[in-house]
Amino acid sequence: MKKIKDLKWEEFSLLDLFVPKKGNQKNMNSLEEGEIPLVSAKKVDNGFKGFYHVNDKEIFVGGCITLNNDGDGGAGLAYYQPSPFALDTHVTALYPKEKMSREAMLFISSCISRQSVLFGHGHSINSERLKQMTVMLPAVAKHAPDYGFMEEYMKKTEEKMLIRYKKYLSNKKLSSRLKLINTEWGEIKITNLFDIFPGVRLTKQDQKPGKKPFIGSTDNNNGITAFCCNTNASEDKNVLGVNYNGSVVENFYHPYNALFSDDVKRFHLKNHIGNKYIYLYLKDCILKQQEKYQYGYKFNEQRMKKQVIMIPVTSKRTPNFAYMENYMRNKEQLLLNRYINKRLKLLQEV
């Protein structure tokens, strides 16, 4: 494969390569939670804002590039979108005029994003500026992008990263090297295992836009229903957020600072600092009680305090936190290695 510095580069008009289609979601605060990812003019997370319910006619087909027209630090950034999505009005979808691979669009997205320093709130990408936008790309001939090189380059880059991470996993002292013997199980009251704290009511109208996750009683998106900059007594981290209203008993681990609604309780381990592995293990132990709580039998605070769960215990009948952590570390390594091996196989077969 040729080196980047040895390539012939040429300036291409963006609209010679793509057909633009502007986003149509004007008022995101009015959208209900759903299953369709919404792409907004963010500077992180591939532009992803959350999952919402939108009309089928408003869904954009995947296999394109999204370009932020403006935004707080996100103007001019481009992302490859592989699957169907909803699109904010501050973003334009770019659909290739000719067949283009995922890798080629990832390469072009990076080249477009390098120009983001030219744009901002005072200089957004309107329709006229979009017509004038160009991008520097490898070329095989005049006005012919070298899609073959772009695809090969991105595959090689991905392969190198996967091999590097695989090596990192094999060198790291993870629990797959530890012997996970069969453990004893025992019953324990939730209140004997956790200190339970309430959330605080915060309506949509009172939420101020920001970067802090707001945790509601949903069953998806790790419980995050919005992002805000508010502050109240519910702000917490390294905790399980457990729904006692809405999607009852559903719970998620939150290692980051977040605000919690009054429909969500905060579970802190007693006598143990806890970490993501232990909390994620206990998440599933709690979730196994979900079937007994329905509309006619709420998971209210009184029942929550009396609820018993089954967990691994030591010979002294205390919670076996070491086993929980090692078990989850082991699972994590197995799943990561499985994904890496599968992806490497696909890359090497092409």
Image (spheres, grey):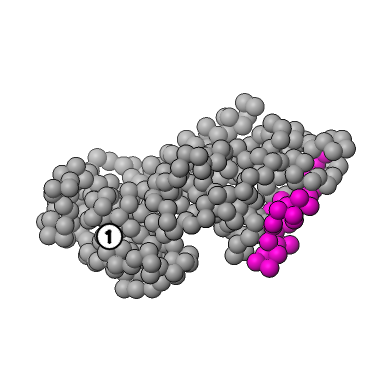
Indicate whether 6 appears above or below 265: above
Image spot of residue 29 (x, y percent): 44, 58
- Foreground residue, 222 or 272? 222
Kindly identify the amino acid type of the residue bearing the numbered disc 1: Val
Q: Secondary structure at mark 1?
A: strand
Residue 30 visible, this orientation: yes
Residue 122: within the magenta? yes
- Foreground residue, 21 or 10? 21
Q: Which residue is mark 1?
A: 264
Q: Residue at x 24, y 66 (%)?
A: 197
Residue 113: within the magenta? yes
Answer with left or right where residue 217 lies relative to residue 116. left
- Foreground residue, 348 or 244? 244
Indicate whether 99 appears above or below 110: above
Residue 107 visible, this orientation: no
Residues rendered magenta in the picture: 112-139
Answer with left or right where residue 205 lies relative to residue 163. left
